[in-house]
Amino acid sequence: MSRLPIRPAVLAAGAAGLSYAALRRRPPGGEGTWSRTNHRGEPVTLLEGPAVAIGGMAGALAAPGLTGRDRAAMLVAGTAAAALGGYDDLAGSGSSRGFRGHLGALRQGELTTGAVKLIGIGAAGLAASALLGPGGARRGRGPGAADLVINAGLVAGGANLMNLFDLRPGRAIKVALLTGGLLSATSPRGRAAAAAPLGASAALLVEDLGERAMLGDAGANALGALLGTAAATGLPRAARVVTLAAVVGLTAASEVVSFSQVIEHTGPLRWLDMLGRRPAPARHRGTGLGGRASRAAGPGPAADGAAAAAAEAGPAAPASVPPR
């Protein structure tokens, strides 16, 4: 297996780290805008998310072997996903959860921030897909109708699915690292495209595991969109169809199955999920509740990702401070 391109990964990691430090020094709108309280009663910041997005896109600009269209697609997908996720982080009420919740609210005439995000990321996925050539085809050509739909699904579906994993410290980043590692084994273009989000997320893994910061919707959506674009860039059509089917299947399963409960009751997955994490408080041991931020407990309104966390937690979790 060829090695991951070093330059874009290092640049992405450096840009993410520097952005995070700069944002922590001067948080836009003040520190309280981005601060939330986790189940331990400790503050965590959502500024990790914008920093990861900035790092991932900076690395994509420097990735060798990508065309200008590839880079433009990654910038469109990453920027839109980060902006829309940030909007949901800061302005969302958390009153509706998942596709069913947002669609149900729409049927009743209510446009939730989550619905705005879903529609916006879907449009961004189409825009990014239009910039890409079909995987494995001659560069510089636009995609056909089938590739347009497949690639858009990978970008938008990847953004949404990564957010569903952002329920425990480090979990989404671990999923991103595993996914990016698989993509790096596909093709030179796939390796180049995956290097940037891998480097950016790895740079802030320690902050996430230490429960000092969290990706939030901004970071998780951006990370998933960038990896979805990398899949659309580097995989042949058959592999993209299989990958999209897996994304759709997992997303559908999340509506009826708790990922956290599945992980908790599967030994290897539980070990990987807990790797590097702080031990859960005694009141949460045995429940699978590792603990993430309660956005409702912070000074800002609750966001959709935290609402999903409350659903994962079940009735045993305190209502005011659900885990991520």
Image: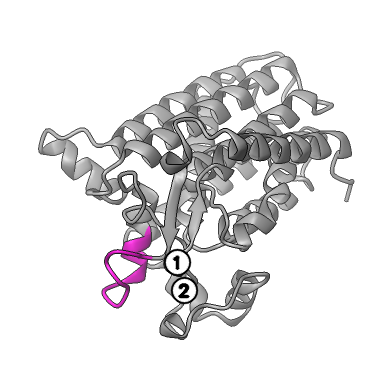
- The residue nearer to you, when weighing 155 against 151, is 155
Label 1: few (<14), some (14–19) or many (≥20) C-alpha neighbours in 10 Å: some
Q: Quadrant of residue 128?
A: top right
The span from disc 2 to disc 1 (Cα, nearest Å) is: 5 Å
Q: Where's residue 31, x and y in %?
A: 48, 41
Q: Residue at x 60, y 56 (%)?
A: 208
Q: Secondary structure at mark 2?
A: helix
Q: Where's residue 43, x and y in %?
A: 48, 57
Does the magenta-highlighted stretch encompass residue 320? Answer: yes
Q: Residue at x 57, y 30 (%)?
A: 78
Residue flagged by tag 2: what amino acid is it? Val
- Report the span colored magenta: 309-322
Q: Where's residue 147, x and y in %?
A: 55, 28
- The residue nearer to you, when weighing 44 against 88, is 44
Q: Residue at x 56, y 36 (%)?
A: 50
Residue of label 1:
259
